[in-house]
Amino acid sequence: MKIVVVGDVLLDVDIDGEATRLCPDAPVPVVDVENVRRRAGGAGLVARMLAGDGHSVTLLTVLADDEAARHLERALEGITVVAGASGAPTPVKTRVRAEGHPVVRFDEGCAPPPDPAVTPAMLHALERAAVIIVADYGRGLTSNVELRSVLATLAGRISIVWDPHRAGAHPVPGVAVVTPNLTEAQTFARNFARAAGSAEAVNDDPAALARDLRLRWQSKAVMVTMGSQGAMLVHGTAQPALPIPAPKTTVTDPCGAGDRLAASLAVHLMDGHTLDVAAVLAVREAASFLRHGGVAGLAGEPKPVNLQGRDTDALALARSVREAGGIVVATGGCFDLLHAGHTRALAAARSLGDCLIVCLNSDESVRRIKGPGRPILNQEDRAELLLALEFVDAVMVFDEDTPEACLAALQPDLWVKGGDYDVTQLPETALVESWGGRCTTVPYHPSRSTTDLADALARVS
């Protein structure tokens, strides 16, 4: 399926080197340049990230006719680019770093340009999108009336993730989620208050800001990002705000984190996840992006955590994946006589994160739940069969009737059940949410069950 990224592009130049002395004519460091790298920024960075993840991406933007634009075209090789004329020079942002630490940034061609026109080809490309990311960098593209009209129509059919800019246009009504950072949200709220002639101070509480902006923008949701403090998600009028904690991460340069978050949100929404789950995953993936060096590490774009070997120590596995910035997924059940419904559900659960731990009912627990004739296979055999599946990374056996003690020890980011469950009614939901985890479901296959399989075997025995 096609992901379409709409927005302004700019050329980012990274100059890296070593600073061992001060300039003789001014107390500033002298950077001995070791490497100069040019890469796509703005909406181009979002498209580059998605292409690096293996997605089919189309970038809708405007380009200048200058040397910087030719560098951009080379940086965007392999991505389908549908572009109109910008009518202004390519904006260039140059960052100088010494031993990985930012020293200075200087910008060229970043004055606000005239609002660019869009081409019929750009509008036509939107119609083929499975999901859309609007990466607004304040260069005027999102103000185009024709573009906004098409986006507003599509918002009723597909998910649109809108990453706004303080100098950009407001999101069109009906988009799935708008993702301002806290400073941007405060600025937007103050601008709205000023335009309304309100003398009241703006409430800077992230949840209050998100609620206010959601109503003003008429979006389905607003997700205010707060750096190391995670994010605050608000959607619907009756639902409480959802705080999403971020994993602890050492950050030297936060550049690109918002782009990574918007890209991840769009992918997970396209894959059919609820917004709550998509938001949790996106925050985790943005933190992982920064942990792996952020934009400085794009040459080695962070991939999902690579699990070396099959670690059956569930607690150690959960700890190592979490420390690496990965997403720990857990599911549970008896898994007595594995069948296709089990394997499909387990594969779907594993796709949501970087490891899957199965909380397995012990033999005694199964007998109390299912009766004296069960389990058919003992817990050692059931665990061995589960671990033989490539998408199961560890098994943790528990003796209680419910997996709550097991979950309290593991503290997974996601607790996954089959679609025949209502996660709001599960006794473990409140527990999982207490540490910032979320509960979700994967498709249920009603024609496949252990009981049916056992009955069939009894008839042929």
Image (tube, rainbow, N blue to C red):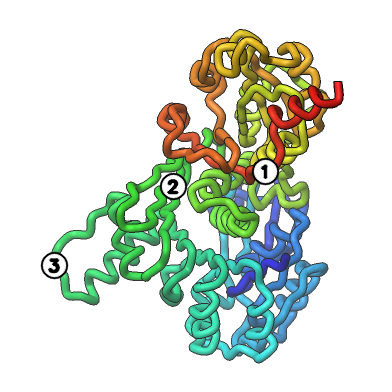
Q: x, y percentage for residue 420?
A: 56, 41
The residue labelled by disc 3 is: 199
Give residue 248's mark.
Answer: none
Residue 376 appears in the picture as rendered? yes
Q: How far apart are marks 1 and 3 (CA)?
A: 57 Å
| Circle 3 crowding by C-alpha within 10 Å: few under 14, some 14–19, many from 20 | few
Closer-to-camera residue (456/251): 456
Give residue 231's mark.
Answer: 2
In the picture, measured across the screen, residue 391 lies left or right of residue 11, that is: right
Image: 140 above or below 352: below
Q: Earlier in the sequence, mark 1 or mark 3?
A: 3
Q: Which amino acid does label 1 sit on?
A: His
Q: For the residues carrying marks 2 and 1, which lies nearer the camera in this image? A: 1
* Secondary element at tag 1: loop
- Extreme-right residue of the structure: 461
The residue labelled by disc 1 is: 445
> Which image quarter: residue 456?
top right
What residue appears at the point 51 percent right and 19 percent down from the top-left corner? 402
What residue appears at the point 56 percent right and 35 percent down from the top-left corner? 414
